[in-house]
Amino acid sequence: MKKILLVEDNEMNRDMLSRRLERKGFDVLLAEDGGEGLERIQRDMPDLILLDLSLPVLDGFQVLRQAREDPKTESIPIIVLTAHAMADDREKSMELGADGFDTKPIDLARLLGKMNDLLDR
């Protein structure tokens, strides 16, 4: 069972997406802010990370940057999730090393396609 870390501060989004992913057979780990997300990345070594950009403590860009700078976590696939579909957010995410980018509200079929492509590498 693939271990997915969902870093999302919005409780409703976190609960909805985690339940849907669990029904698809994933083991879902949760973090409510960027600081907790970074700790869980380093401690739990997930197979893939779903990372919101708008987070308290550390924002998604800071988490992404630090995860990519750590040799232990640099190769974990990261898909950035955001409700702000700004072109510069996508560009900055990819420059910092994100493997994918998706917008909210989540289209589960589209997100699962991206996740499975990355997990099959």
Image (spheres, rainbow, N blue to C red):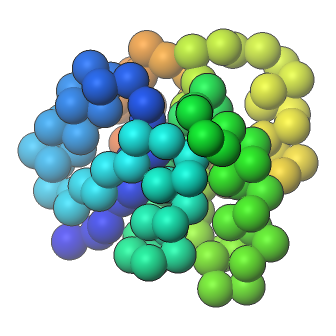
| 86 displayed left or right of 24 | right
**Residue 33 location in percent, x, y?**
49, 42
Which residue is located at x 68 percent, y 66 percent? 67
Classify residue 52 by image quadrant: top right
| 90 displayed left or right of 45 | right
Residue 64 sits above or below residue 113 on the image:
below
Which residue is located at x 66 percent, y 44 percent? 58
- Figure quadrant of the N terminus: bottom left
**Residue 74 location in percent, x, y?**
70, 74
| 76 displayed left or right of 113 | right
Which residue is located at x 56 percent, y 53 percent? 35
What is the total number of numbered labels drawn onto the structure image?
Answer: 0
Q: Nearer the viewer, residue 118 or 76?
A: 76
Considering every residue shown, the one lying at the far front of the view is 57
Q: Nearer the viewer, residue 121 or 14?
A: 14
Residue 60 is at least partly visible in this image: no
Residue 65 is at least partly visible in this image: yes
